[in-house]
């Protein structure tokens, strides 16, 4: 019984945790690129020093524009931006 409970509670969250770069690119292309042809064309984007700050900026934009992104969308977009533009550690 404990193994089943562990599998039901933990494994779905593990699969959810991995960022999906393809989804991040799609979200960026559909929502962000309209205003930011490159992420550096926005106040504050060129001042990112780590992925946590980048994630907060993505979340702030999502909230401001009422994109209704969930945590996975923010994680995917943050990872895409970091892979393509920022190359930040942690």
Image (cartoon, rainbow, N blue to C red):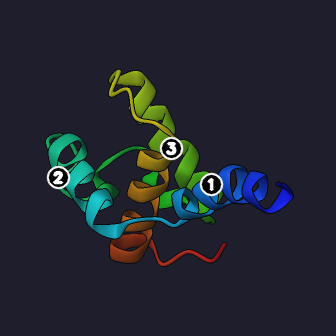
Q: In front: 42, or 80? A: 80
Q: Is residue 59 left or right of residue 67?
A: right
Q: Residues within 10 Å of mark 3 (few under 14, many from 20)?
A: some
Alpha carbons under labels 2 and 1: distance apart:
26 Å
Q: Residues within 10 Å of mark 1 (few under 14, many from 20)?
A: few
Q: Residue furthest right?
A: 2
Q: Is residue 82 left or right of residue 71?
A: left
Alpha carbons under labels 2 and 3: distance apart:
17 Å
Q: Nearer the viewer, mark 2 or mark 3?
A: 2
Instruction: Point out the tag, 2 or 3, that comes first from the N-terminus.
Output: 2
What's the mark number on residue 57?
3
Residue 32 location in percent, x, y? 24, 44
| Residue sitting at x 53%, y 56% | 16
Do the residues bearing badges 2 and 1 touch, measured as CB atoms within 8 Å?
no
Up the image or down, 82 lies above or below 70; here it is: below
Give SS at disc 1: helix
Which residue bears the numbered disc 1?
A: 13
Q: Answer whether residue 44 is visible to the viewer in this image.
A: no
Q: Is residue 38 left or right of residue 75?
A: left
| Residue sitting at x 41%, y 47% | 73
Give SS at disc 3: helix
Alpha carbons under labels 3 and 1: distance apart:
24 Å
Q: Answer whether residue 17 is visible to the viewer in this image.
A: yes
Instruction: Point out the tag, 3 or 1, that comes first from the N-terminus.
Output: 1
Which residue bears the numbered disc 2?
A: 29
Q: Nearer the viewer, mark 3 or mark 1?
A: 1
Up the image or down, 17 lies above or below 32; here it is: below
Q: How many marks?
A: 3
Residue 79 location in percent, x, y? 45, 65
Q: In front: 67, or 15? A: 15
| Residue sitting at x 25%, y 61% | 25
């Amino acid at each position: 019984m404990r193994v089943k409970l562990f599998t039901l509670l933990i494994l779905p969250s593990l699969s959810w945790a991995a960022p999906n770069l393809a989804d991040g690119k799609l979200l960026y292309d559909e929502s962000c690129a309209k205003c930011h042809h490159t992420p550096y064309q926005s106040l504050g984007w060129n001042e990112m020093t780590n992925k946590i700050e980048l994630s907060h900026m993505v979340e702030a934009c999502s909230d401001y524009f009422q994109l209704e992104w969930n945590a996975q969308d923010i994680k995917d977009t943050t990872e895409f931006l970091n892979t393509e533009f920022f190359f930040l550690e942690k």
